[in-house]
């Protein structure tokens, strides 16, 4: 991703036809583009002006609203011009092409994905966690996720991170001031309540982590692999978990290809079910997956390797079979397994949850509904989903890792502080250093000390025009 600051333009509305379409331009000085497109020297700042958008020969491309947001009072912090026309793909393309033509002399070019938001970040309009929340809000697939993304966008998450950084910083300054007077080190930890302060910071961090973890779960969901031989009741289970007959088309072998994941909400928690029905091996008659399907299968196994939990479904009436063993042998190590014994209405088992050394065993009947609530509860337990947690920040894995790393540094700091004075001559030095590292990790969440290549990755995942 480039950091060049030439003016940029893009269609900001979704592709396709709609009542309105918007072309957006951002740059240092857009006066010449405004003059060329709108036929006037100046537009009243932040006012919508109805006018024709003009070609070079003066003929109109479309009639619509032009809004000029002079720097710094705009989304990006630069001059921004928004042209709202009729939302047809051809009109929008013509309008965009005309903007690029009129802006050629000031170096106007097409925006890259996320580049408007990247500029908002670089110009300190928003921090990195807020910029990520912009993308998350656009991509939200549930109301709860949208609500949490909106919270993060308004700065709720950034605020608690800032507060943590400030607390760590002030403790660190206190320690560093003492380092200049080594003879006082001995009593410092006792007298300053540094240990108490550190403990309070760690308690706050733990609370933030808990909320953020819920937010990350809300954003990304729990990835579950659904495996089992044919006819054990996998589709029936998906339907009952989804609460209604979602369109689960019985896959004709090999037709599933890319469509292997579907998301079901359990008490508001997204459960991404990766269906292994699409994984087909070569048949005994020599038939087997073609090249495209093979790629699909590889992708599915890659997904399986990343799963948070494996749901292995078996027929309780038949008991375990050789085929089940074969399926089990393909499971990646270290991923928790739930063995779901289905059809207990036939087998006569009771609906129960048994925690066994190899896996959790849940006995259900997908068709009669027995035990399904227990399975739901078990999935929520594995995910660590807490319905009681009210405010969630729509956090990302990146944030969780940073919070975890910060907590580890604080734990090291606490260990240094706990050393007794003779043993830990340099304990205060190390204490201060760990605080500094914790501070850096926390700050990376809001974008300080965030490496450029990571910034590039974050913004490149945005849609164009945002
Ligand atoms: P899949 O091939 O694993 O997706 O299995 P399906 O969900 O298509 O179910 C296979 C057959 O088992 C269907 O005829 C279902 O009606 C039946 N079935 C599914 N769950 C149950 C259950 O809990 N009890 C009984 N008796 N039959 C079930």
Image: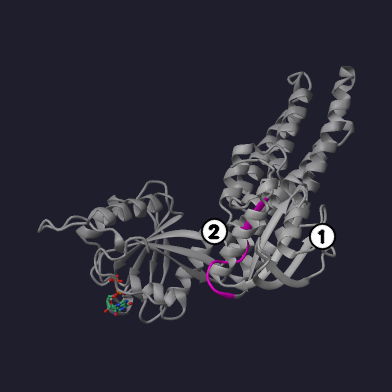
User: Would you identify the image quadrant in which residue 282 lies?
Assistant: bottom left
| Residue picked out by circle 1 | 41
Colouring scheme applied when the structure was drawn: one colour
Q: Nearer the viewer, residue 199 or 303?
A: 303
Instruction: Answer yes or no: is residue 40 visible.
Output: yes
Residue 300, percent from left and from top? 35, 55
Q: Secondary structure at mark 2?
A: helix
Instruction: Answer yes or no: is residue 391 visible.
Output: no
Vertical placement of 318 versus 418: above or below? below
Taking the magenta stretch, the answer to whether it contains residue 11 is yes
Residue 153, percent from left and from top? 72, 59
Badge 1 or badge 2: first in the primary sequence? 1
Q: Secondary structure at mark 1?
A: loop
Q: In the image as oriented, which residue stretches furthest toward the front?
A: 57
Q: Nearer the viewer, residue 104 or 120?
A: 104
Taking the magenta stretch, the answer to whether it contains residue 248 is no
Q: Residue at x 57, y 49 (%)?
A: 460
Q: Residue at x 62, y 52 (%)?
A: 114
Q: CA distance from mark 1 to mark 2?
A: 48 Å
Q: On the rendered structure, is 263 left or right of 146?
A: left
Where in the image, quadrant-wise, is ligand 1 located? bottom left
| Residue picked out by circle 2 | 220
Residue 140, percent from left and from top? 59, 65
Q: Quadrant of the C terminus?
A: bottom right
Magenta extent: 8-18
Q: Nearer the viewer, residue 144 or 77?
A: 77
Vertical placement of 322 versus 168: above or below? below
Q: On the rendered structure, is 318 left or right of 462?
A: left
Q: Quadrant of the N terminus?
A: top right
């Amino acid at each position: 991703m480039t950091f060049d600051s030439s003016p940029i333009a893009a269609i900001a509305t979704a592709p396709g036809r709609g009542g309105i379409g918007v072309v957006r331009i951002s740059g240092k000085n857009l006066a010449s583009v405004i003059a060329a497109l709108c036929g006037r020297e100046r537009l009243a700042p932040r006012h919508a002006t109805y006018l024709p958008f003009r070609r070079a020969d003066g003929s109109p491309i479309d009639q619509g609203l032009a809004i000029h947001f002079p720097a710094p009072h705009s989304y990006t912090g630069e001059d921004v011009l928004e042209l709202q026309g009729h939302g047809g793909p051809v009109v929008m393309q013509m309008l965009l092409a005309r903007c690029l033509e009129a802006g050629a002399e000031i170096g106007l070019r097409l925006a890259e994905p996320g580049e408007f938001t990247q500029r908002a970040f670089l110009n300190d309009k928003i921090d990195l966690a807020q910029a990520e929340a912009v993308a998350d809000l656009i991509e939200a697939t549930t109301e709860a996720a949208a609500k949490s993304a909106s919270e993060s966008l308004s700065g709720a998450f950034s605020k608690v991170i800032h507060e943590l950084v400030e607390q760590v910083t002030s403790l660190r300054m206190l320690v560093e001031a003492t380092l200049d007077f080594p003879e006082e080190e001995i009593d410092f930890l006792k007298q300053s309540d540094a240990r108490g302060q550190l403990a309070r910071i760690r308690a706050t961090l733990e609370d933030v982590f808990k909320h953020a973890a819920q937010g990350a779960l809300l954003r990304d969901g729990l990835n579950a692999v659904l495996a089992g031989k044919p006819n054990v009741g996998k589709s029936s289970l998906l339907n009952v978990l989804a609460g209604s007959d979602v369109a689960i088309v019985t896959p004709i072998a090999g037709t599933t290809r890319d469509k292997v994941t579907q998301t079901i909400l359990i008490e508001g928690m997204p459960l991404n079910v990766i269906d292994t029905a699409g994984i087909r091996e070569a048949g005994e008659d020599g038939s087997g997956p073609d090249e495209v399907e093979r790629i699909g299968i590889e992708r599915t196994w890659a997904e399986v390797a990343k799963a948070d939990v494996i749901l292995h479904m078996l027929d309780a009436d038949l008991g375990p079979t050789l085929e089940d063993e074969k399926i089990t042998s393909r499971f990646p190590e270290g991923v928790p397994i739930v063995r779901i014994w289905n059809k207990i209405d036939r087998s006569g088992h009771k609906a129960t949850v048994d925690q066994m050394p190899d896996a959790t065993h849940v006995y259900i009947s997908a068709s009669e509904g027995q035990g399904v609530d227990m399975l739901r509860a078990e999935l929520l337990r594995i995910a660590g989903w807490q319905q009681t947690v009210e405010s969630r920040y729509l956090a990302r894995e990146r944030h969780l890792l940073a919070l975890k790393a910060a907590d580890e540094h604080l734990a090291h700091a606490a260990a240094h502080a706990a050393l007794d004075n003779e043993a830990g001559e340099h304990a205060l030095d190390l204490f201060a250093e760990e605080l500094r590292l914790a501070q850096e990790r926390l700050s990376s969440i809001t974008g300080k000390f965030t490496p450029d290549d990571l910034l590039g990755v974050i913004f490149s995942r945005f849609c164009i025009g945002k």
